Image (cartoon, grey):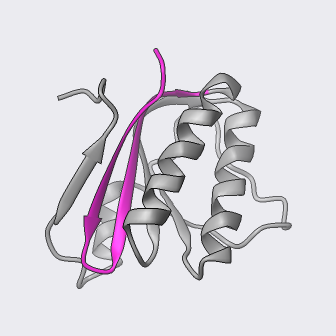
Amino acid sequence: MTLVWRYTTHTGLGVLSLAGHLGTEAVPQFTGAVGWALARGRGPVILDLTELRGWSAGGQLAVADAARKLAAEGRSLELAAIPPDGSLVPDGSGPPMKVHTDLGTALAAHRDCGEEQREWRSDDWPE
């Protein structure tokens, strides 16, 4: 399965949801999705990994790079629902990332985020 994504904005934050596998070959799609989030949102970005079936070391490095890009714009990256086959181990060189057990917990941490306001997604996002 290839990587597909959906980006939704809420009041003061965005949620970038991934489905599929974040391997080295999918890094360009992921990088594009992060660019989309940077251009169309504000505040923290919650990376929702609920539908992600796995990620490679290259995919994990891309997540760490995304955290650095967001930090350069004064934003943070938070992770929700890390895949069961591995976890992102920060190497200390990037900004800290909050890790939530699931998307509901991540959204609850941002009490005033409100309902989804707008959504964009890749063509193959599952219904």
Magenta region's main secondary structure?
strand
Percent x, y of residue 111: 25, 83
Identify whether 73 is placed above or below 84. below
Span of residues in magenta: 1-22
Residue displayed at 56% across by 29% down: 54
Percent x, y of residue 35: 53, 54
Residue displayed at 75% across by 35% down: 58
Whether residue 3 is in magenta: the answer is: yes
Identify whether 8 is placed above or below 25. below
Percent x, y of residue 41: 38, 69
Q: Nearer the viewer, residue 104 or 36?
A: 36
Residue 122 visible in the displayed image = yes
Q: How many callouts does the rendering have?
A: 0
Most extreme residue toward the top is 1
Q: Nearer the viewer, residue 89 or 27?
A: 27
Residue 46 visible in the displayed image = no
Residue displayed at 33% across by 56% down: 103
Q: Nearer the viewer, residue 100 or 120?
A: 120
Identify whether 66 is placed above or below 20. below
Whether residue 97 is in magenta: the answer is: no
The image quadrant that residue 18 belongs to is top left
Q: Is residue 40 left or right of residue 8?
A: right
Identify whether 1 is placed above or below 116. above
Residue displayed at 68% across by 75% down: 72
Most extreme residue toward the front is 39
Which quadrant, please, contains the C terminus? Answer: top left
